[in-house]
Image (cartoon, rainbow, N blue to C red):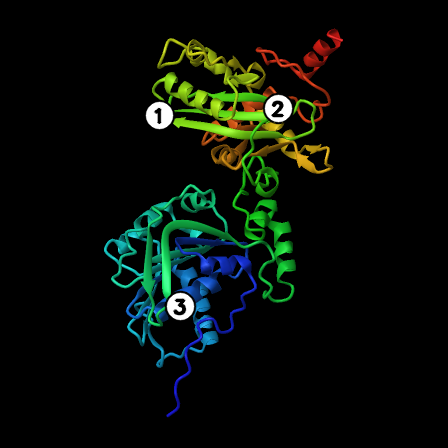
Amino acid sequence: MGRKQPIDIWRGFVFDNPAQVAFLKSPARYRLLSSGYGGGKSKLGCRESIRIALEYPGSRNLIARLKSTELAATTAKTFERELREIGLARGEHYTVNKNEGTYYWANGSETIFSHLESDEKFGSSEFSTIAIDEGSQVPDPVYEILFPGRLRWNVGPHRAWICTNPGASGFLRKIVYGEMNGSGEETTFVSSSGRIERVVDDFAWFPVPPGANKHNPPGYNEQLARLGQSYGPHWYSRYVQGDWDSFEGQRFPMFDRDKHVLPAPFRPEPGRHRIVEGWDFGHRETFVSWLAYDPRGDEPVVVFAELQMQEVQEPSDVADRVREIRRRFGFDRPHAALGDPAGGGATQFSAVSPIAAYGALGIHIAPCKGGKSPTSRADLLSEFLTGEVRTWGGKTWPGIVFGPECQATIKSVVNLRWDLTQNSKGEDPREKFVKKDDHGFDAMTYGLVGIPPPRERKKPVILLDDVNLDARTAREMLAREG
């Protein structure tokens, strides 16, 4: 009798997609692989689950999707196709109990298919790995039950991965935005072949660029382009280009992370850059943004620092943090500080206005009288986002960019939604913003009001303590001074 050939788990799989390769090499316990349609996500997710089942005898592995009908019609069929491509045969390498939705492997491992429509069914379940297909459809409470509580079967390697199109999932967006952090604790597992697998308790995101999968059938991309014309730009951006920052009602669809977010931190230069602070006051949250610009108009405006303080009790707490940030960037006070004009009045919590309270602490903020309307400030930000600045080196930049540390501000800008509302007289619709996570947008745009747009910054502008001066007033002052 001839000797059996070893099983090649990756037989028929072509490693020409950098995001997929990075996904496989990553030691992160929780991995998110996202792309538009046709990115090869489900194929890779199923292969990885098969790998664990074969390399770790006795492991218990879950493959899940929100709806049972979609699980059977798509994910399960992909799994069967990958088994055939690898050369695994039913009856020899595994058996299947269709009623249980379970594959029983010859080495004692199990692969369990389950929907996620009821989170109660996982109350006492334990798994070695969890693979979720189309994870953006899964409600956040389900993730909170599964991770990390269900990853505790007595056989490792205790990992989870999610393959999905971009969507509205708050849990997954936190991974995309870098807000999910594990303990960093490292664990090692040894497979049946002696392979050492290093697992780090952390979250990692692997976006597949559009068109990275070269193995789609002919005409596939053209078909998606035609669907995009029918379903609109938001659908195309999300489901074809794999963009997490696009959705219906988005106020700033022109925002592009590759274009508007700097790759490295920015530090303003004394004597060259003007610094403006933007303040948004709130009983529950106070937000401060720092913006820098070159008054000669040779550079984009840079949002380089932010301060987000929640459950604020005393203005002195915020003032101390503001002074700390100012010192870190090498200045005692900004050239201007603009705040919510409502901050000049008393509140239901205090007879002293926020602006007066900070003034008593030596933090002087002018009410942004020209920025009362959020619609006007949104229009101003749109002008900066779509504007262009050509530097002396010849490179063209947008009118505003964001430092990589300003993620709360970026998130606020990206997630700002608006609805069209029509009054009882049937007049034209106007923008009505959804009041959620808008503090970063408010603080940053209050500061932006104090900065001339790119088309206005052709020569130095004088900024006084009262910065509610428009560009025309500034030019008249320059003319008077010769």
Q: Gap between marks 1 and 3, in whole Å?
A: 47 Å
Q: What amino acid is labelled 3 in the image?
A: Arg
Q: Which residue is drawn at 56% across and 16% down?
A: 336
Question: Which of the marked residues, 1 or 3, is nearer the chain's N terminus?
Answer: 3
Query: Which residue lies under the disc numbered 3?
Result: 51
Of badges 1 and 3, nearer the viewer stands 3
User: The N terminus appears in which quarter of the rendering?
Assistant: bottom left
Kindly state the secondary structure of the residue where label 3 is placed: helix
* Quadrant into which the C terminus falls: top right
Amino acid on which the number 2 mark rests in the picture: His
Determine crowd level at label 1: few under 14, some 14-19, many 20+ residues with C-alpha closer than 10 A: few
Contact between marks 1 and 2 (CB within 8 A): the answer is no
- Residue 311 is tagged as 1
Classify 10 Å Cα crowding around label 2: few (below 14), some (14-19), many (20 and above): some
- Mark 1–mark 2 distance (CA, rounded to whole Å): 33 Å
Can residue 56 be seen in the rendering of this structure?
Answer: yes
Q: Reply above or below: 127 against 357.
A: below
* Left or right of 199 in this view: 453: right
Q: Which of marks 3 and 2 is in front?
A: 2
Task: Compare marks 1 and 2 and give the one earlier in the sequence.
Answer: 2
Residue furthest to the top? 480
Residue named by callout 2: 273
In this view, the residue in front, 470 or 478, is 478
